[in-house]
Amino acid sequence: MARKVFFSFKYEDVSRAMVVRNSDVIRGTEKAGFIDAADFEKVKRQGDQAIKNWIDHQLQGTSVTVVLVGAKTRASRWVKYEIEQSIKRGNGLLGVDISKIKDFKGTTSDCCGELPAGYPFYLWFKGDGYANLGSWIEAAARKAGR
């Protein structure tokens, strides 16, 4: 089933997030929540409400939110906001540890994130995300009745 998926992540993990986004494991699924650095800086300069508006707009029409968790994800107030808004909208929600994906410098990080209780959490490499992300998304959507 084709569905629109919102990807939530701390922007400093964008290189890791792009690995997941570009893995092509969710063919036919629209991917939201990605913004390039120049656009992000423009929105950021406009203040907190502009960031909230951008997030709210990106979440429109989505049925699942995938939280890509790296070393500092837990500290991100915007990831927290995206999770809160996703739950309010009734999106399916799941977390994926991306800390062991190499960044642009070839380094990895520690996983340091969690989701609210009751939502599944997967490891990208150990859980074979390339093969399983699509089924993880579908399971989250079904659990949410989407």
Image (cartoon, rainbow, N blue to C red):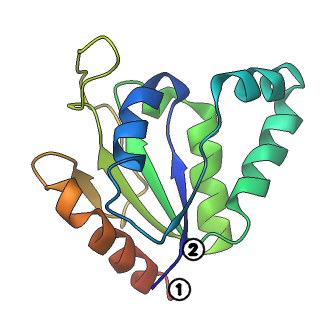
At label 2, the amino acid type is Ser
Residue that appears at 32% across and 69% down = 134
Q: Residue under circle 2?
A: 63
Q: Is 47 displayed left or right of 123 in the figure?
A: right
Residue 146: numbered disc = 1
Along the viewing direction, whichever of 102 and 51 lies nearer the viewer: 102
Measured as percent of width and height from the top left, residue 141 is found at: 45, 79
Q: Which mark is residue 104?
A: none
Q: Secondary structure at mark 1?
A: loop
Residue 79 position within the rendered picture, expressed as x and y whole percent measured from the top left: 57, 40
Q: Residues within 10 Å of mark 2 (few under 14, many from 20)?
A: many
Q: Is residue 33 left or right of residue 121?
A: right
Residue at (45, 33) in percent of width and height: 74
Q: Is residue 87 placed above or below 84 in the rendered structure? A: below
Query: As displayed, is residue 115 above or below residue 11?
Result: below
Helix, strand or loop at mark 2: loop
Tell me if label 2 and label 1 are in contact, CB under 8 Å. Answer: yes
Of the two numbered discs 2 and 1 on the same chain, state the one appearing first in sequence.
2
